[in-house]
Image (spheres, grey):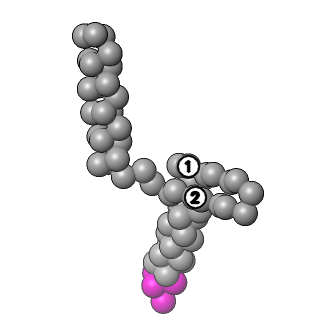
Amino acid sequence: MKIKQNEAQKEDAHMSRSADSHTATPAVELRCGGLYLTVQRVPVWLVSLITTAAGAGAAWWTSR
């Protein structure tokens, strides 16, 4: 019985740790008047799009 209780306690502890990981600080938090925008994770495609556009813009600007 003690082995099963210990396993149950370990599982409970693991579940509480994983629940705490969901309360991590957001990547972006914007507050403007009544608007409150929170982004938990920035999508990879968005980062790729921004870096590609910045690189293309920098290449265009330097070739002028």
- Looking at numbered disc 2 in the image, what kind of residue is underneath it? Thr
Residue under the image location 53 percent in, 77 percent down: 12
Residue 30 vs 59, above or below: the answer is: below
Residue under the image location 50 percent in, 57 percent down: 40
Residue 44 vs 55, above or below: the answer is: below
Note whether residue 17 is visible.
no
Residue 49, located in which quarter of the rendered image? top left
Residue picked out by circle 1: 28
- Could you say which is closer to the camera, residue 28 or residue 59? 59
Residue 31, position as x, y percentages in the image: 68, 54
In the picture, measured across the screen, residue 36 lies left or right of residue 5, that is right
Name the image quarter holding the C terminus. Answer: top left
- Could you say which is closer to the camera, residue 8 or residue 46? 46
Residue picked out by circle 2: 38
- Could you say which is closer to the camera, residue 64 or residue 17? 64
Residue under the image location 36 percent in, 52 percent down: 43
Structural distance between the alpha carbons of marks 1 and 2: 6 Å
Note whether residue 14 is visible.
yes
Residue 60 vs 14, above or below: the answer is: above
Sequence order check, earlier mark of 1 and 2: 1
Instruction: Judge whether residue 51 is colored magenta.
Output: no
- Looking at numbered disc 1 in the image, what kind of residue is underneath it? Val
Q: Residues within 10 Å of mark 2 (few under 14, many from 20)?
A: few
Residues in magenta? 1-5
Q: Secondary structure at mark 2?
A: strand
- Could you say which is closer to the camera, residue 35 or residue 45? 35
Contact flag, marks 1 and 2 (Cβ < 8 Å): yes
Taking the view exactly as shown, the residue that stands out farthest to the bottom is: 1
Residue 54, position as x, y percentages in the image: 34, 28
